[in-house]
Image (cartoon, helix red, strand yellow):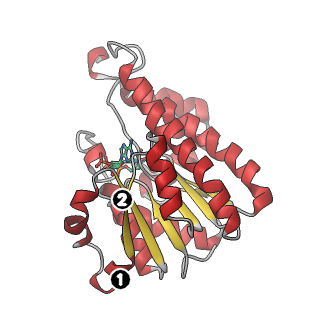
């Protein structure tokens, strides 16, 4: 998969890993990048952090991935896309049992699972029309093993991992390559309350594009993710036991 001259769309590109994806795409020679964000009013401030010589290649797109009308407008605006990066996501630090109600679990499924599926369905014909292209889903190591402190988030991202596999199979016939990225803890707003060693978001973005260029479908970049993959494939049950120590606050 070649990034140079691609026309990319990144969801949740106003901060965190999404913002780093825009930088990395520009540095890898993307022809154009559509920057999906809920608040396009902040675009000029955000754009100041992207490489000056390429900034003109970035076009803001108003997009909440749970909002069907905005999704249809985004498809109409970005009909030339051949690389979709499904990065937008949310995480509540809630357990599956200790959370008071189902609200946070529902929100996570609505954004992380259904929101991503809506975008993928909407852009699948666009990717097909533009030669197949590629799709990236930003998963997490928690897609493979449940961290009880983030129990409902982990479940939503496990569902997204399964979605990624199914979408990969369904889109193969139209020539769309489907990639999944499994980061460990990353230095962004999402993980600010997570007391673990974290990797920079630029490493994930850069590492994703390099892995895509090498043709790797399942992408593990940061040191924690690389170790997690090893532990998962060596002994998934031992890993589950190890993760069971990360309990939600109410249970500790
Ligand atoms: N940080 C980590 O440790 C870590 C580890 C593994 C995987 N990930 C995954 O990496 C991705 C990016 O996370 P991050 O760490 O960069 O988090 P972040 O800093 O909290 O950024 C989340 C991004 O998603 C956007 N977003 C949330 N809900 C949305 C919606 N309904 N529609 C459109 N955009 C929405 C946010 O937009 P607003 O600014 O409008 O809220 C923001 O741009 C997520 O999928 C996350 O699960 C993160």
Say which residue appears at 38% left-offset and 70% top-offset.
Answer: 59
Query: How many residues crowd around disc 2 within 10 Å: few (fewer than 14), some, or many (20 or more)?
Result: many
Say which residue appears at 50% left-offset and 30% top-offset.
Answer: 155
Quadrant where the C terminus is found in the figure: top left
Q: Which numbered dot is residue 54? A: 1
Say which residue appears at 42% left-offset and 19% top-offset.
Answer: 96
Picture coordinates of residue 131 (x, y %)?
A: 70, 70
Looking at this view, name the residue that lies furthest to the right: 173
Query: How many residues crowd around disc 1 within 10 Å: few (fewer than 14), some, or many (20 or more)?
Result: some
Please determine whether, in this image, residue 5 is positioned above or below residue 116: below
Residue 244 seen in the figure: no
Q: Earlier in the sequence, mark 2 or mark 1?
A: 2
Q: Residue 132 appears in which quarter of the rendering? A: bottom right
Q: Residue 105 appears in which quarter of the rendering? A: top left
Q: Which numbered dot is residue 232? A: none
Q: Is mark 2 within 8 Å of ligand 1?
A: yes
Relative to residue 165, is residue 191 drawn left or right? left
Picture coordinates of residue 23 (x, y %)?
A: 36, 72
Of residues 114 and 181, the one drawn nearer to the viewer in this rendering: 114
Relative to residue 195, is residue 117 drawn left or right? right
């Amino acid at each position: 998969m070649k990034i140079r001259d691609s026309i990319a769309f990144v969801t949740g590109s106003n901060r965190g890993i999404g913002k780093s994806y825009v930088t990395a795409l520009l540095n890898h020679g993307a022809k154009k990048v559509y920057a999906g964000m809920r608040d396009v009013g902040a675009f000029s401030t955000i754009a100041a952090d992207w490489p000056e010589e390429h900034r003109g290649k970035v076009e803001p797109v108003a997009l909440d991935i749970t909002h069907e009308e905005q999704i249809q407008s985004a498809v109409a605006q970005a009909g030339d896309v051949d690389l979709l990066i499904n990065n937008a996501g949310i995480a509540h630090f809630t357990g599956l049992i200790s959370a008071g109600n189902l609200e946070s679990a529902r929100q996570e499924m609505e954004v992380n699972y259904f929101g991503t599926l809506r975008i993928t369905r909407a852009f699948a014909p666009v990717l097909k029309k533009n030669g197949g292209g590629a799709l990236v889903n930003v998963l997490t190591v928690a897609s493979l093993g449940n961290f009880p402190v983030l129990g409902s988030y982990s479940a939503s991202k496990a569902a997204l991992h399964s979605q990624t596999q199914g979408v990969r199979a369904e889109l193969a016939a139209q020539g769309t390559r489907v990639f999944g990225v499994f980061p460990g803890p990353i230095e962004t707003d999402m993980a600010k309350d997570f007391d673990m060693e974290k990797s920079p978001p630029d490493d994930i973005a850069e590492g994703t594009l390099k892995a895509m260029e090498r043709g790797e479908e399942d992408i593990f970049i940061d040191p924690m993710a690389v170790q997690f993959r090893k532990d998962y494939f060596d002994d998934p049950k031992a890993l589950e036991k190890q993760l069971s120590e990360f309990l939600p606050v109410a249970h500790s």
